[in-house]
Image: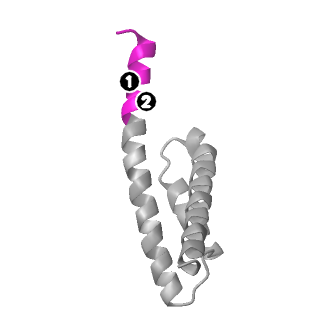
Amino acid sequence: MNQLEEARRDIDEIDEKMAELFVRRLEASARVLEYKRENSMPVFDPAREEQVIERGVGRMENGRFTEYYRRFIITLMDISKEYQHRLLEEHRNI
């Protein structure tokens, strides 16, 4: 196996794990929404998002990846909020 094939195999394995973690994250996001709905809290909590971003960035041992991880986690939180809004909309239509 050459370097390219090995790197692609690694990426495929990582993507498989990331897909599983993505599902778990959205399921947790749905549980967060349920709590927020029961307690009349908004979906968007800017202070909490900043905490998540800064904590995540702080985990980056290699500084050259920090800005990319920041963008990744922001995008992931945007997807989570979008999912929560969709769930809210579905709940209203029941």
**Above or below: residue 11 compared with residue 49:** above
Residue lying farthest top? 2
Quarter holding residue 84:
bottom right
Q: Residue at point 63% right, 74% down?
A: 44
Label 2 vs label 1: CA separation? 5 Å
Q: Could you say which is closer to the camera, residue 26 or residue 76?
A: 26
- What quarter of the picture does the N terminus occupy? top left
Name the kind of residue labelled 2 in the image.
Answer: Ile
* Highlighted range, magenta: 1-13
Q: Position of residue 10 (x, y in %)?
A: 38, 27
Name the kind of residue labelled 1 in the image.
Answer: Arg
Residue 11 numbered mark, or none: 2
Q: Position of residue 5 (x, y in %)?
A: 41, 15
Q: Please tell me how crowded label 1 is: few (under 14), some (14-19), or many (20+) other residues with Cα within 10 Å.
A: few
Q: Which residue is mark 1?
A: 9
**33 within the magenta span:** no
Q: Position of residue 78 (x, y in %)?
A: 62, 60
Q: Position of residue 43 (x, y in %)?
A: 60, 76
**Above or below: residue 2 compared with residue 94:** above
Residue lying farthest front? 94
* Dominant SS in magenta: helix
Q: Residue at point 65% right, 73% down?
A: 46
Q: Could you say which is closer to the camera, residue 50 or residue 7?
A: 7
Q: Residue at point 52% right, 83% down?
A: 36
Q: Are marks 2 and 1 in contact (CB under 8 Å)?
A: yes
